[in-house]
């Protein structure tokens, strides 16, 4: 027993100098959220994440079963994060970040703890001299940035994320998801130019396809392709002005067999490109953000678009063109904001397929207008009220009005 105690004391003595090099910062928020819809909607997590209203569904008496008000209140977005800062390694500042909430990884696991972010961060910086008038200042700028772990889906440009209050954060007009990935950024501080390259994989947000002949969502379609999702971005960033472009390549094997059948499925791969142009400007007390997307199968990013499986086991794209604008006051206790989004189905009416995978194929267009008003105490507590109207262009267009109230206590 004495030897064990001595061994533990020695181990603690070895660990203590290592722990002294790390600092921990806990943070997060609690966010009770009430919302009411005038119509049944397509969404997730008890429809807290709203995509668009459901089409008209008549019963035998001609009543629309999807029409009518319903309401709910949830606090599942309560979040806790931990930042761990450590010593410099290979000339880079290092940290790790872990964050979770209680939305669950699927609708069936709502209220369960779910991993949002978990990554290792390495940043290489450089000291430069900047002259302003007659004075010369020494400043530190970031030159290279390497991130490995679970982080924002590459087509989520987090610097321009809409500040709407519900869980969707502008989706499906703006992508909203996270993926395991390796991300590299290079910045040129003199020109304000940034280049970003990302290779990502799937977990919570999965592709659609045929698994053992059954239409479903699964990571198997991406895993069997052996090719990660690839994303390249070129950006210009001065702090108050930020804009850029992105191109995204996704490759999957839409037909996967994991159980024996007499019919051998196709192992053909399907690749799709999506493109984005985005920007943000800070104009004194007003922040303006905007983005346009050519969505070619961004289902995994909680956006629109997809692909068609034809009778000969080949695949065909179908596209959405999406644009959105977000304006918000960024100072003061009262902070009004407005989100506007519009999406157009560029292949609406195409019925020449055996299976359709994606989101929104039966809509010709989708638009949303969403004013909000936030009151912040600037001490961690804030209140937000929103009115969100979304119109879906089915054969017979329908609209949904969502009214929501929420509190946020951030710490």
Image (cartoon, rainbow, N blue to C red):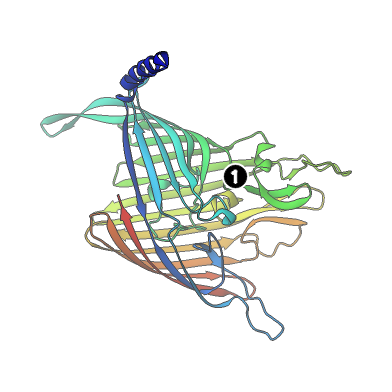
Left or right side of 295 for 93: left
User: What percent of the width, then of the height, locates residue 396?
Assistant: 62, 76
Q: Position of residue 205 (x, y in %)?
A: 57, 48
Instruction: Name the residue located 39 percent from the left edge and 14 percent from the top edge.
Output: 2
Query: Residue at 71% across / 62% down in the picture?
Result: 350
Front-lying residue, 147 or 319: 147
The reply to whether residue 185 is visible in this rendering is: no
Q: Residue furthest bottom?
A: 61
Q: Say which of 359 and 87 sits in front.
A: 87
Q: Residues within 10 Å of mark 1 (few under 14, many from 20)?
A: some
**Element type at mark 1:** strand
248 vs 285: above or below? above
In the image, residue 79 lies at what x, y percent?
40, 50
Horizontal arrangement in the rendering, residue 62 relative to residue 174 (left or right): right
Residue drawn at x 65%, y 73% is 395
In the picture of the structure, the residue carrying the numbered disc 1 is 273
Which corner quadrant of the image does residue 56 belong to? Answer: bottom right
């Amino acid at each position: 027993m004495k030897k064990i105690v001595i061994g533990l004391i020695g181990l603690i003595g070895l660990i203590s100098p290592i722990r002294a090099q790390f600092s921990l910062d806990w943070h997060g928020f609690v966010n009770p959220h009430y919302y009411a819809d005038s119509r049944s909607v397509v969404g997730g997590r008890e429809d807290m994440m709203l995509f668009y209203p459901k089409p008209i569904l008549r019963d035998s008496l001609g009543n629309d079963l999807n029409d009518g008000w319903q309401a709910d209140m949830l606090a599942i977005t309560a979040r806790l994060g931990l930042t761990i800062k450590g010593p410099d390694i290979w000339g880079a500042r290092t940290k790790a970040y872990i964050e979770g909430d209680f939305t669950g990884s699927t609708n069936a696991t709502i209220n369960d703890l779910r991993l949002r972010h978990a990554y290792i961060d390495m940043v290489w910086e450089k000291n430069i001299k900047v002259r302003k008038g007659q004075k010369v200042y020494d400043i530190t700028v970031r030159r290279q940035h390497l991130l490995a772990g679970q982080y924002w889906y590459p087509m989520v440009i987090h610097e321009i994320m809409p500040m709407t209050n519900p869980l969707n954060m502008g989706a499906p007009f703006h992508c909203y998801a996270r993926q395991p990935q390796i991300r590299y950024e290079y910045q040129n501080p003199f020109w304000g130019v940034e280049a970003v390259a990302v290779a990502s994989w799937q977990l919570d947000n999965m592709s659609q396809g045929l698994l053992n002949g059954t239409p479903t969502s699964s990571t198997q379609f991406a895993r069997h392709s052996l090719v990660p999702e690839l994303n390249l971005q070129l950006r210009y960033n001065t702090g108050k002005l930020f804009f850029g472009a992105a191109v995204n390549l996704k490759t999957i094997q839409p037909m996967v067999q994991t159980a024996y059948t007499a019919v051998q499925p196709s192992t053909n791969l399907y690749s799709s490109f999506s493109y984005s142009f985005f920007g943000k400007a800070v104009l004194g007390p007003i922040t303006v953000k905007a983005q346009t997307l050519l969505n070619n199968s961004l289902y995994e990013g909680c956006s629109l678009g997809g692909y068609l499986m034809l009778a000969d086991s080949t695949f065909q794209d179908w596209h959405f063109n999406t644009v959105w604008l977000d304006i918000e006051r960024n100072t003061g206790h009262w902070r009004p904001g407005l989100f506007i989004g519009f999406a157009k189905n560029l292949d609406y009416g195409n019925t020449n397929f055996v299976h359709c995978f994606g989101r929104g194929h039966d809509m010709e267009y989708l638009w949303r207008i969403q004013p909000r008003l936030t009151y912040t105490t600037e001490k961690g507590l804030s209140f937000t009220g929103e009115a969100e109207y979304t119109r879906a262009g089915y054969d017979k267009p329908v609209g949904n009005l969502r009214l929501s109230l929420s509190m946020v206590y951030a710490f």
